[in-house]
């Protein structure tokens, strides 16, 4: 596929809002792609050149891009930054800058999708001291051959800021439509393989190929997620449920095969070398050829410590042994996904749990099975008294559904009034905080758009504000008076007293008394709350206030 064709398609899709039309345009393109282009296309159209499980990253921040764009367009870096601030969208700004340049350029090489992928792979492989310079050189090379429209989407891919309104669901349905397979099977295969590019290739082979997908060690799948709920709500279904402590630590997936162990975080980053103590414990407690799911907590004097303690260890690159000596980390295992060449995710939870207790010699999460509200409530209070976050209720007959936040796992915890929101902007502070950002603009997800819902200025310590400034300062893509806007990466957990209807924000809702609780570094944008969640909570509270 010629990359210009891809860019034109993106531009066309961006202007469409109808789901069916998006799917049909995508399906038409998918059926015309070559075998080689198909997987690349499916990944790139979601703005994610590499499968999530692969751990490959581009690591291109706005600064690198400014440098490359300045070089290619023959402008000063400041001019580029200024243009970006005025246009607001980095892709659109690069398109504009390139279009002014192309009037005077005589020669461009035709780029293909494969050329762009090769360049992205090259960038992702660059590490070490000189890598920044080398990355700039590769970006310069592709941007020099790019037309303005191509430059627009290359920029969006490089900055991981690709929002053309094609979600995973639309792409899944388009693959199904184009290749005449059941969308449910495409979804299933994608849960197992965690790579829509590979799944599209299987779909072209037919439904049987999709049914045959298997989990294998060292190819992590997304974690199954939980919904918020109430004990009585879950018991309404009439069946006994499994009740487990909800540990306040960090989620992990542990894989072991041929005596090699690897541990992955909730975002599927490999954390094996940061957690040698936990890996050693699990290696000893588990047999070979296995994938398990759990939560690791930090413990001091028998009491759980805040979950940031564990996250800090996940991020640690130096003095790991000392850190491991200082705080005890304990893994808690609550699920098994694969054992001895067999994929277990389609078995009911009750059976997976039996296998887990048989094969793991230690660390299996205690469990109560009950349909008695009073008994479950007592268990919940025991969990809170022991310093845990609450309990998880799990449907005994449920499959393990990677990446799905369904009704099969329900979390019960005291503070329900928090939301996970994406930080999309900030305003400079005042007085002694004038050198850092003092308040932040927060947004909810609405499909692949981010819609502002609140600002937060309370709950931060000075250390947190300077950490936030250091973390976010290079992500600024637009300035407007005292406000700056970010390429959005961080998720804040925000407490609030009430959700109100408000004309001040585009989404129609605002938070009353928002306060900062945590940076949720373990969550990525996909896991932030949605506009729909906010509306649902608003309706729920108003219903209970009126009843
Ligand atoms: P939340 O992060 O509030 O969406 O709650 C879901 C998270 O709770 C999961 O992703 C796990 O990291 C964590 N968790 C703690 N204990 C358990 C448990 N027993 N079963 C499943 N998840 C648990």
Image: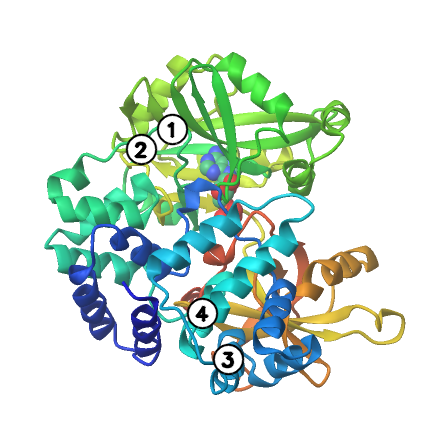
Residue in the picture at 76% in, 30% down = 319
Side of 247 relative to 18 (left or right): right
Along the polypeptide, which appears first: circle 3 or circle 2? 3
Q: Which residue is mark 4?
A: 145
x, y percent for residue 428: 76, 75
First in sequence: mark 2 vs mark 1: 1
Q: Which mark is residue 196?
A: none
Q: Residues within 10 Å of mark 2 (few under 14, many from 20)?
A: many
Quarter of the figure that contains the N terminus: bottom left
Mark 1 neighbour density, 10 Å: few (under 14) some (14–19) many (20 or more): some
Whether label 2 touches label 4, CB < 8 Å: no
Callouts 2 and 1 close, C-beta under 8 Å: yes
The residue wearing badge 1 is: 369
* Dot 2 beta carbon under 8 Å from ligand 1: no
Q: Is residue 508 left or right of residue 462?
A: left
Residue at figure coordinates x 29%, y 59% from the top left? 169
Residue 335: percent from left, percent from top: 40, 29
Q: Disc 3, disc 2: CB below 8 Å?
A: no
- Which mark is nearer the camera, 4 or 3? 4
Res 434 quadrant in image: bottom right
């Amino acid at each position: 596929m010629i990359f210009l064709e891809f860019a034109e398609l993106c531009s066309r899709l961006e202007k469409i809002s109808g789901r069916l039309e998006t799917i049909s345009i995508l399906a038409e393109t998918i059926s015309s792609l070559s075998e080689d282009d198909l997987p690349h296309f499916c990944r790139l159209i979601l703005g994610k050149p590499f499968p999530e499980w692969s751990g490959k990253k581009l690591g291109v921040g706005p600064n690198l891009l400014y440098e490359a764009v300045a070089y290619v367009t023959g402008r000063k870096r400041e001019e580029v930054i200024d243009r970006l601030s005025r246009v607001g969208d980095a892709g659109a700004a690069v398109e504009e800058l390139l279009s002014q340049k192309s009037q005077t350029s005589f020669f461009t090489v035709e780029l293909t999708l494969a050329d762009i992928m090769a360049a992205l792979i090259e960038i992702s492989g660059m590490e070490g001291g000189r890598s920044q310079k080398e990355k700039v050189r590769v970006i310069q090379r592709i941007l020099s051959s790019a037309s303005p429209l191509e430059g627009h989407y290359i920029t969006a891919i490089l900055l991981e800021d690709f929002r053309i309104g094609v979600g995973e669901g639309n792409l899944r349905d388009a693959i199904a439509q184009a290749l005449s397979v059941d969308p449910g099977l495409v979804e299933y295969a994608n849960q197992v393989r965690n790579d829509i590019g590979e799944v599209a290739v299987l779909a072209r082979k037919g439904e049987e190929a999709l049914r045959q997908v298997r989990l294998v060690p060292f190819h992590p799948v997304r974690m199954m997620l939980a919904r918020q709920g109430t004990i009585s709500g879950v018991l309404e279904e009439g069946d006994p449920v499994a009740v487990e402590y909800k540990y306040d630590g960090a989620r992990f997936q542990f894989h072991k095969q041929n005596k090699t162990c690897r541990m992955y975080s909730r975002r599927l980053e490999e954390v094996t070398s940061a957690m040698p103590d936990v890996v050693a414990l699990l290696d000893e407690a588990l047999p070979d050829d296995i994938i398990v799911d759990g939560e690791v907590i930090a413990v001091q004097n028998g009491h759980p410590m805040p979950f940031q303690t564990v996250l800090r260890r996940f991020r640690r690159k130096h003095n790991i042994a000392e850190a491991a000596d200082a705080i005890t980390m304990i893994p808690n295992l609550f699920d098994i996904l694969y054992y001895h060449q067999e994929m277990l995710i389609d078995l009911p939870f009750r059976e997976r749990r039996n296998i887990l207790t048989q094969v793991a010699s230690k660390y299996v999460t205690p469990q109560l099975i009950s349909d008695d509200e009073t008994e479950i409530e007592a268990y919940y209070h025991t969990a809170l008294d022991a310093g845990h976050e609450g309990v998880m209720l799990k449907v005994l007959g449920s499959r393990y559904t990677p990446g799905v936040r369904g009704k099969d796992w329900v979390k019960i915890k005291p503070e329900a009034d928090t939301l996970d929101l994406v930080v999309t902007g900030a305003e400079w502070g005042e007085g002694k905080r004038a050198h850092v950002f003092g308040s932040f603009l927060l947004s909810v997800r609405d499909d692949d758009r981010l819609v502002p819902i609140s600002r937060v200025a309370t709950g931060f310590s000075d250390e947190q504000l300077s950490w936030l400034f250091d973390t976010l300062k290079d992500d600024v893509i637009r300035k407007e008076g005292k406000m700056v806007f970010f390429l959005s990466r961080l998720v804040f957990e925000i407490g609030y007293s009430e959700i109100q209807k408000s004309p001040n924000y585009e989404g129609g809702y605002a938070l009353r008394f928002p306060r900062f609780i945590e940076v949720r570094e373990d969550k990525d944008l996909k896991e932030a709350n949605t506009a729909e969640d906010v509306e649902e909570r608003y309706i729920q509270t108003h219903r209970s206030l009126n009843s």
